[in-house]
Image (cartoon, rainbow, N blue to C red):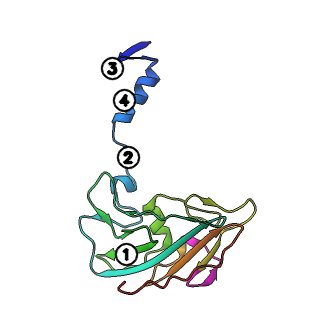
Amino acid sequence: MTYTLSGMTLIGSAVVAAIVGLAQPPQGGGPAAGQELAGIRCDAMEGNRVHIHQHLVIFDHGKQVPIPDNVGRPLMKQCLYWVHTHTTDGVIHIESPTTRTFTLGDFFTIWGKPLSTTSVASAKADKGTTLKVWVDGTPYKGDPRAIPLNAHTDVVIEAGPPFPTPPKFTAWAGR
């Protein structure tokens, strides 16, 4: 089949479907749609029962992986997850209307990125190895998804080599 669209000739229905698909908003749920994830809602306002902060740094073979701003602020819905970021400095905000323990796995679920013993966001451990994880300057050997996000928890995750000395976050003033 041949179609003409704005002076362009398109061949085949797959091309037309692809173009039409680009004009449609993404379907389904997940972080982009603001659906509830891991028991965490996306509310119109930040919660005020729990208000704590953590810090996350990821290294991919020595190069720092950026943690984006506005993780937890969906593109398709005006809301904010209880676990989110505002800036690119790696500070995670928990502003919840309910008291519960949140984990690093909750943050990654909301971010929509992988987290396991061998991969974190875009970084992957070399074949046959695992990530090096540090919590508050101490090596962590368990499942990184289970790391509790308490007040001022400082997490460093490294895929390497090299494995740089984990930086200690000290900019907690006012947080």
**How far apart are the two marked residues, 4 and 1, measured between alpha carbons?**
39 Å
Task: Look at discs 3 and 2 and give the one toward the viewer.
Answer: 3
Residue placed at 48% from the left, 85% from the top?
A: 170
Q: Which residue is mark 2?
A: 28
Element marked by disc 3: loop
At label 2, which amino acid type do we have?
A: Gly
Question: Badge 3: few (under 14), some or many (20 or more) residues near its Cα, within 10 Å?
Answer: few
Occupied quadrant, residue 137: bottom right
Element marked by disc 4: helix
Are discs 3 and 1 less than 8 Å apart at CB?
A: no
Please identify the quadrant where the C terminus is shown: bottom left
Task: Look at discs 3 and 1 and give the one toward the viewer.
Answer: 3
Q: Which residue is mark 3?
A: 6
Q: Which residue is mark 1?
A: 94
Answer whether residue 143 is magenta in the image. Answer: yes
Q: Residue furthest top?
A: 1
Establish if 16 lies above or below 156: above
Answer whether residue 166 is magenta in the image. Answer: no
Element marked by disc 2: loop
Instruction: Give the residues drawn in magenta, as a range.
Output: 135-145
Establish if 146 lies above or below 22: below
Mark positioned earlier in the residue sequence (4 or 2)? 4
